Amino acid sequence: MSGRRQTIACPICDTMYQVDDEIAVRDTRCIRCGHRLTFGRRGAIARVVGLAMTSAILMGLAMFLPFLNLTSGRNTVSASLVEVVGGFADGLMVPLAFAVFGFILVLPLTRFVLLIFALGPVAAARPAFPGAALALRWAIVLKPWAMAEVFMIGVAVALIKLSGLATIGMGSAFWVLCAVVLITAYQETFMCRHTLWTELNSARA
Amino acid sequence: MDRAEQRARLITARDAGRVGCRSCGLVAPLGQRRCTRCGAALQSRDTQSLQKVWAWWMAGLITYIPANIYPMLRSTELFRTTESTIVGGVVDLIHYGDYAVAAIVFVASIVIPIGKFGAIAWLALILGRPHAQDTHRLHRVYEVVEFIGRWSMIDVFVVAILSALVQFETFATINPGIAAISFAVSVIFTMLSAQSFDSRLIWDRLKEGTPA
Ligand SMILES: [Zn+2]
Ligand SMILES: [Zn+2]
């Protein structure tokens, strides 16, 4: 591990740097554009895998627990996340339901699975699976399209808009999804591309 | 070594006759097609970058127009159907006194999309030829545009949630209007437009002799 030197270029401005392991364990920024080249966080891979696993399990759980409870008069109905997202799906609106479903559930979940598949073996000090590099690349590409946190703000706005019509309470899945959003934000602070790619590459060789 | 001196010694991968991977950062010899570390396609500069930016930008703008003209929501209450557009929805919210929600919807559905169209066009116009702008400011605008686009989806999600929840009630129905779909498509197109920028253009196109 020691003395390994790599030439990297800043992905934003193309400035070249020599990075060795001593530099890579620190928080470094590109001198020209300020882009974070290395995050300098220890145990990044293990944390990313652990947090992705936690998020994936919680997300699976959130699909089956009640998301919102609607009370009108004496009746209380609970709606699951799938019902809240796709309950309006008929005719023209089916594509919209699919898109919403993809952005808030399928894509975040896909990202967690890709990260676990790509980095799980590395975290366990085993050789990486074939296709691990492709999986990690896609996990990075999909990041802006996974919109669970945007959805949660949408839920809050919808609840306020509906407050006059019925009494709506948050179900357990609501809080579980909030937790997933927070865990994902925390996980991003460990997603140092330089570290992830260097470790994955040495696990493949 | 002070910063100015440090800056003068900076050299880009292209200056060195090499190519940097935009996915993992590893530098490869010019002419190599794929990165050996992550497998991403290598390209020293995306020469089609600005054409792609403008194409997605136009598509986004065209789909943003019906998103504002047609109703976002159609609500039926006891045989009476009302339709509301994006702007109409904000006006209703102000009317009912929900100022905070009105502000969120106004920012997410009107301020961010229009600001984004303006910011992307401004960047693309400047980067189309050599410029003497402050690279830090251009880079900041680029970062904000990349970060903020997805938050416009809030209104689409709100419409979906409202329509689903109201179905649990018997006295009223709410359906998403055609604008919800064109708005979602417009947000996707503008996100693709912002992602098509080759950020390296910001420094490449700097006029000779301008302080970076
Ligand atoms: Zn840089
Ligand atoms: Zn690469």
Image (cartoon, grey):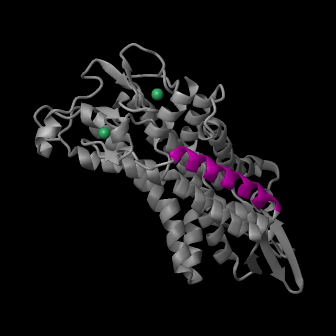
| Quadrant position of the N terminus of chain B in the picture | top left
Q: Position of residue B209 (x, y in %)?
A: 10, 34
Answer yes or no: is residue B162 visible.
Answer: no
Instruction: Depth check: give the residue in front, A87 or A35.
Output: A35
A3 to the left or right of A194: left
In the rendered image, residue A48 lying in the magenta stretch gets the answer: yes
Q: Quadrant of residue A19?
A: top left
Residue closest to the far right: A75
Q: Is residue B30 above or below residue B55?
A: above
Q: Position of residue B150 (x, y in %)?
A: 53, 52
| Quadrant position of the C terminus of chain B in the picture | top left
Answer yes or no: is residue A91 visible.
Answer: yes
B88 to the left or right of B50: right
Q: Is residue A74 above or below residue B150?
A: below
Q: Is residue A146 above or below residue B72?
A: above
Residue numbers of the magenta segment: A44-64
Q: Give the tally of numbered discs.
A: 0
Q: Position of residue B51 (x, y in %)?
A: 41, 30
In the rendered image, residue B97 lying in the magenta stretch gets the answer: no
Residue closest to the far front: A2
Instruction: Depth check: give the residue in front, B66 or B31.
Output: B31
Q: Quadrant of residue B202?
A: top left
B128 to the left or right of B190: left
Magenta stretch, main secondary structure class = helix
Q: Position of residue A16 (x, y in %)?
A: 29, 30
